[in-house]
Amino acid sequence: MRTSKTLMIVSTALVSAAAAGLIAASAAAAPGHAAPGHPGQPAGQSFPSYSVKTILNGAGLTHHNSHTGKKEALSKPDDLTSFGGDLFTAFQNGVGPQGEPSTTNNADSTVVEFTPGGSVVAQWDLRGKVDGLTANPATGEVIATVNEDLHSSLYSIEPGGEVIHYQYSKPLPHNGGTDAISFFKGQMLVSASAPGTTGAAAPNAKYPAVYSVTLNQTTHAATTKPYYYDEAGARLANKDLGARIRLALTDPDSSEVVPWSAPRFRGNFMLNSQGDQELIFSWDSGSRWVLKLPQSVDDTAWATSWDGKLYATDSGADKVVVVNSRKFWPGTAFVAVTPCNANSAPATCPAPPKFPANYLGLLNMATGQIIPVELHGGTLHPVGLVFMDSDS
């Protein structure tokens, strides 16, 4: 997530001058009624068929309980990332969002590296609840954040397998934890999750929504500076197109860098405010467009080739699955829809039909519309998503 200062200034000017035209073109390129939410697909074409297959199951994997030392099964996989032809996921093993031990007194999550076919390559136990997991495309480091509500820190799994633990150099000013990581224009951007866990409630104009984080390998300190704030200005990207608003974020969560195959906001950093049902796109720290959603979502993954594969975690079923298709339309945006994570969700959830269990959806980036994906061969209630090209 990094570019030169000159490029950022030029890009900001281009966005300011051409944003309206880009949005109009994106809306015009969106499919007709026959294929809503499938922006990479030509009008009139039928949807591809999608099948799901389990490739990794926590019940078949073990780690040593941090308290008892005894072997126990892995559970609750969450985030996903890929690098060098392999995938990585984090099993949270029942650890709480502030690092509280599980019901078996275990305090460690387990990061597992595995092949696209599901063969385990390596695994690491990290103290805390791993919620954000991303590979640095420039170095191959796998960065994990732990404890998304409070008492947060970071780990780096180096290409040789060494683990480095980083502590934040000062208390995080949003009084919460940290979650997703994205590498964008020379910066490591980390979402400021659970703002106001202590102190003033969110939204709060003084709370950063995203941090730019620098890691010092000598001191093992992580220093932060705000990228933008929970009440920063923005423009609407779907209804009332272009209208200026002020954000009121209460749940910064997942993040992605939009690939160039996407039909809109190519190359932007995207922050998902899960409970608020918003996706915030920014070319730099001073430009923001907000896509309002009808449902809460967690991860987003775009198809970047015709013959890749979509991988997903199902935390409730303790499994990782692969979603296959005869062909993927490049630019298709898949989302893990999480109705029970909306701010408006009832205390007892799922509560269908308005608040069903998690499902895989297709996002129309022009309108924000989401439609369910019909899956064959098994069930899936997704949390984490990642698309992997066939030549990765």
Image (cartoon, grey):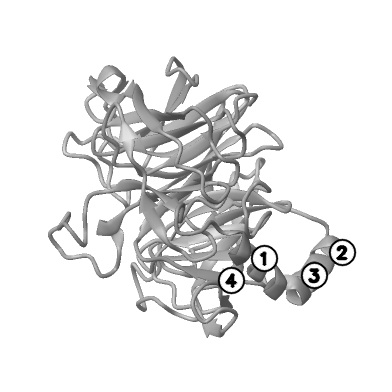
Which of the marked residues, 4 or 3, is nearer the chain's N terminus? 3
Judging by the rendered image, the residue that carries numbered circle 1 is 25
Judging by the rendered image, the residue that carries numbered circle 4 is 289
Above-or-below relation of 358 to 319: below
Query: Could you classify mark 2 by the number of other residues whose Cα lies within 10 Å: few (under 14), some (14-19), or many (20 or more)?
Result: few
Element carrying mark 4: strand
- The quarter of the rendered structure image containing the C terminus is top right
- Mark 4–mark 2 Cα distance, whole angstroms, equals 22 Å
Residue type at mark 1 is Ala
Which residue extends farthest right? 6
Residue 318 x %, y % = 27, 31
Which of the marked residues, 4 or 2, is nearer the chain's N terminus? 2
Which of the marked residues, 2 or 1, is nearer the chain's N terminus? 2
Above-or-below relation of 286 to 104: below
Element carrying mark 2: helix
The residue at the point 51 percent across, 59 percent down is 32
Locate residue 166: give its quadrant.
top right
